[in-house]
Image (cartoon, rainbow, N blue to C red):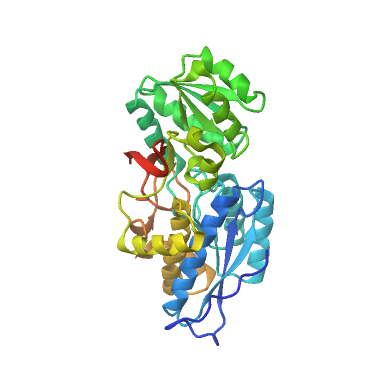
Amino acid sequence: MSTSPASPALPGAARTDEPSVRIGALAPLSRPGWVEAGEHLLAGLELGVREVNAAGGIDGRPLELVIRDTAADPRRAEAAVDELAALGVAAVVGEYHSVVARAAAGRADALGLPFLCSSSVLDALTDRPTEWVARLSPPQSRGWQVYADFLLGAGHSRIAVAAQPSVYWASGTRILRDHLASRGGAVMELDMSALTPEAVCEELAGSGATALLLLVGHPEPAVPIVRAVRGDRRLAGVLIGAPAGQPEFAEWAALLGGDGAAIPFLRYLPEHLTPLGAHVEAALRERLSAEPSFVAYEGYDTVAILAEVLRRGGTDRARTAGAWPRAAVEGTRGRIAFSRVPGINVWQWADAPIQVVDRDPAELGRFRVLRAG
């Protein structure tokens, strides 16, 4: 994808005669990537850039996004980081898929290029402690433990997971198993590289599991699995869950209708948005012609905190990386600042909000908050 143009001039905008501060942006914008998530992430990033430029840019210089489509491919992401570094970007931001973000983070660390990860949760985003990488979304261990506590609180202690081979899914399964086992629960794994949706139903029927978690891609095979389980009378009492957030997006409801309701998932929103968040919500709704997802807010917050980092550290890459722990802003979902979190190798927003929510069966466009953490 080509470089996006600088934001149009607005009252109070950064002067157009100054060279732009170029920022690389990674997002899954084609299949097999989760395109709707990528579009929401990009909408938030672009709105953030537009508003930073309207307020004067970075010391009078406009921000400019240089967008690259990762298509959920780690190798493609690494190549994009190499290309963006050669183009002279001040930093790289974005990405939704955790395994792809991990590849991008590792490459950025090796190159000495600041990378602000917007929406990916793998605890081990890098193999070693690094000063170059920061992250907005909460670590997977924190979010998925909140999800496990929700399951236990709802009376589910024997859990089946339908999982595809992936570092991300394997990490999620391990977090769930360890957290549930310490509280008397158990996890049974169903290998989706070997099972059809119908075979999943057969395994579930005799397992004693009261919940099935979808640790699989969207829409395939997540949607066929939901249809199969919902259509099997033997499994009428089985809760379907999707901790990775598949039901967040409109495509889920469009494909599944009522079958896609009452499927709890994780999202990273607070009970109430900040005043800035309320403003951004209206702007994103107009931009997307749809309800903005938490991923869109993550995109906007990425630009808000990066702009503050750049104002503090300038566009020199080492100074930018050195400014991660000194920057703080009021974002759409709370006050954002980075710190060192035990067990996490990157600069982390430790207070990112977490909710377990589902779509209301009585009104598919409405989300019910089931637990917060």
How many numbered marks does the figure carry?
0
The answer to which quarter of the image holds residue 216 is: top right
Q: Residue furthest front?
A: 362
Q: Is residue 221 left or right of residue 136?
A: right
Residue located at (58% from left, 37% from top): 167
Location of the N terminus (image quadrant) = bottom right
Examine the rendering and report whether any part of residue 296 can be seen: yes
Q: Residue at x 50, y 59 (%)?
A: 288
Residue at the far top: name it: 206
Q: Is residue 21 left or right of residue 360?
A: right
Compared to 202, does 268 lie above or below? Answer: below
For the residue pair 156 and 59, the one nearer the viewer reads as 156
Residue 355 in sight in this render: no
Q: Residue at x 67, y 67 (%)?
A: 2
Of residues 201 and 142, the one drawn nearer to the viewer in this rendering:
201
Image quadrant occupied by the C terminus: top left
Residue 154 against residue 90 in the figure, above or below: above
Task: Compare residues 213 and 311 and report the one nearer the observer.
Answer: 213
Instruction: Give the percent coordinates (x, y) of residue 306.
Output: 46, 66
Query: Measured from the top left, where is residue 249 in percent x and y?
Result: 50, 46
Rendered location of residue 87, percent (x, y): 66, 70
- Residue 295, position as x, y percentages in the image: 48, 53
- Determine the image quadrant of residue 297: bottom left
Left or right: 363 as drawn, with respect to 107: left
